[in-house]
Amino acid sequence: MRLHIGSDHAGFALKERVKEHLIAEGHAVTDVGTHSEEAVDYPAYALQVGRAVATGQADLGVLVCGSGLGMEIAANKVHGVRAVQVIDPEFARMARSHNNANVITLAGRYTDEPTAFEIVDTFLATPFEGGRHERRVEGISDIENGGGR
Ligand code: RB5
């Protein structure tokens, strides 16, 4: 898969490990930064990864900050992004199968490495179920487009 990954300083260490893990699995990973633990502001990275996913440059995106929450909120401001903060692999599965989430955000300060690997692996391996969920995800897009059902 073509993946974009990014983090702020608080997510940097976990982002590096997750990136290595994904590359080892054979994914094409573009790292938009940050590249150190020097303090930065997370919205810039959420924007880059969100845009790559929304424009089709990437199949899916991965973002890491301290809690995963700021990245989630910021990425969801990009039209076409459905970002979810996940701390448990089961929710990664649900986010793909029911919600067709296209960006996952991780909590660098609260998620250990093996759990993070399991979360991203589950996220990448789980297809969107479609069916009744298609209509519901379309409903989310309708809200984004100024309408609503
Ligand atoms: C940085 O201290 C922290 O606020 C950030 O990484 C993230 O957790 C925000 O949601």
Image (cartoon, grey):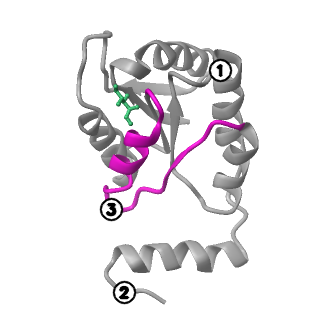
Q: Which tag, 3 or 2, sits closer to the chain's start?
A: 3
Q: Which residue lies furthest to the bottom in this view?
A: 149
The image shows residue 50 at horizontal and vertical percentages of 35, 46
- Residue position marked by numbered label 2 in the rendering: 147
The circle on residue 25 is 1
**137 versus 38 height, above or below:** below
- Residue visible at 36% across and 73% down? 144
Residue type beneath disc 2: Gly
Q: Which tag, 2 or 1, sits closer to the chain's start?
A: 1
Q: Quadrant of residue 97?
A: bottom right
Residue type beneath disc 1: Glu
Residue type beneath disc 3: His
Residue 68 painted magenta? yes
Neighbor class of circle 1 (other Cα within 10 Å; few <14, some 14-19, many 20+) is: few
Q: Give the alpha-carbon distance from disc 3 to disc 2, as whole Å.
A: 14 Å
Query: Which numbered mark, 2 or 1, is in the foreground of this view?
Result: 2
**80 versus 147 height, above or below:** above
- Residue position marked by numbered label 3 in the rendering: 79
- Badge 3 marks a residue whose secondary structure is loop
- Residue visible at 67% across and 44% down? 92
Q: What stretch is highlighted in magenta?
A: 66-88
The image shows residue 80 at horizontal and vertical percentages of 39, 61
Q: Which tag, 1 or 3, sits closer to the chain's start?
A: 1
Decide which of 32, 68 is in the foreground and name it. Answer: 68
Q: Give the alpha-carbon distance from disc 2 to disc 1, as whole Å.
A: 40 Å
The circle on residue 66 is none
